[in-house]
Amino acid sequence: MTGTGEHGTDYDLIVVGAGPVGENVADYAARRGVRVAIVESELVGGECSYWACMPSKALLRSGHAVRAARRLAGAREALGGPVDAAAVLARRSSFASHWKDDGQVDWLASAGIDLIRGRGRVSGPGKVRVGDRVHTARAVALATGSVPVLPPIPGLAAAKPWGTREATSTDRVPPRLVIIGGGVAGTELAFAFSSLGSRVTLLSNAGLLPREEPFAGEHVAASLAGEGVDVRLGVTPVRVDRDADGIASVVLDDGTAFAAEELLVSTGRRPNTGDLGLEAVGLDPAAGVAVDDTMLVDGTDWLYAVGDVNGRALLTHQGKYQARAAGEAIAARLRATPLADGPWGAHAATADHLAVPRVVFSDPEVAAVGLSEADARDRGLDVRAVEYDLGSVAGAVLHADGYTGRAKIVVDEGRGVLVGATFVGQDVAELVHAATVAIVGEVAVDRLWHAVPAYPTTSEVWLRLLEEYGRPA
């Protein structure tokens, strides 16, 4: 597939970054006959496959299963001991393909996509330098993801803390672990390492999961405390040290100190726009990369930015959604075929603005889509929100004795449609797609009354929420 084509370039499209997002851009363009190469400096498959989504969920699942069994009479009596940490780590490693990308490389070849190993940098319009060679293309797509943000705490960098990469790929369970950060990754890994036997302290300068409905973080914090995690909210670390014996200490602004064998920092991520050569085409990496709904970078007709790197929605599944639209849009433009880039068109990632689903694999799980009530009001929408106790739903209580959880929907009163939904409880992750479909499809609330939930399932909460909202006259 290499070699100069009919347009005088090496390829039609070069994708920089071979994670799930880059792979999808390349795949969807290649399916339309576009000559594609993908550039990767690490493992093909990216962060999600080896250091994030898959290994972290593998670390979590065994502990979730044991806790679920403990909540059921008859099942709890069958448990014989704690989680086998070595077995969990081994299972995790299998989900990360033992940090080898042979299978992903084989898939690229089967899809007719060339792999260029090395770090790719834009060196001019339609040009990507990898090592000492410049490759040319009619279009370039950046899919370089995001990188962790290390807060400016004195001594923190010198203490060499774990990031999420080190935590999800570790081959040992520290006796004590201090986590700085109460977002998604910090919360999930607190559950994971607590179940594996670590004594965990979680420090957050706000509440847990601050971007979700307030009750979500409250439920999760209570559950963590019940598992023996020392949850400290509204606190600020002011100093970190690591002594000669390798013990890390964290001092808070009130003078309280915590010591642990390992320190994990999970305080957010930012788009990975550094060292991409954006200056060569007149873009400021520090300003971010703005794109339209086809992922075309503003002010260009050849450069695309897809997934975390554009800062729209830093979630793997949303990046893959953008990638499908972008791959098709790139192919359409290169082939001069009609472009469906209007709202909800085949070449537009419209859902980024209104219907982003997200799941925190904590215990209880937090599953949400669209806008929180506060976000909706900030946008000036006339909304009404209703909530319901999941512990009062027959299908839910079958999952656990003393089931606790909560559900909430946010309705745009002007249009009579859902704009947001949140579910908190055991096994609620699968509820969120129904809400996503309702939001994307702009299904009227009065029509949702005719979507009958099977009994007894947790989905019966939809009926209860509608009853709280009130049936139309």
Image (spheres, helix red, strand yellow):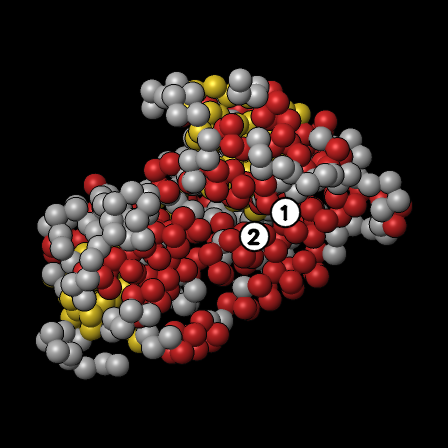
Instruction: Report whether residue 187 is seen.
Output: no
Quarter of image, res 423: top right
Which sits in the foreground, 466 or 313? Answer: 466
Task: Give the mark nearest the N terminus, 1 or 2.
Answer: 2
**Amino acid under label 2?**
Ser
Residue type at the position of mark 1: Ala
User: Is 386 drawn above or below residue 273 in the view shown?
Assistant: above
What residue lies at 54% left-to-right and 68% top-to-bottom? Answer: 97
Judge left or right: residue 433 versus residue 296: right
Q: Is residue 288 above or below residue 165?
A: above
* Mark number, residue 56: 2
CA distance for labels 1 and 2: 8 Å
Q: Mark 1 touching mark 2, by CB under 8 A?
A: yes
Q: Residue at the spot x=56%, y=27% of the render?
A: 408
Residue 411: % across, % down: 46, 25
Mark 2 crowdedness (10 Å alpha carbons): few <14, some 14-19, many ≥20: many
Residue 192 tag number: 1
Q: Is residue 282 left or right of residue 131?
A: left
Could you say which is closer to the camera, residue 370 or residue 15?
370
- Residue 431: percent from the left, percent from the top? 59, 41
Tell me the residue at 13%/52% (across/down).
Answer: 300
Residue drawn 66% across the image and 42% down it: 427
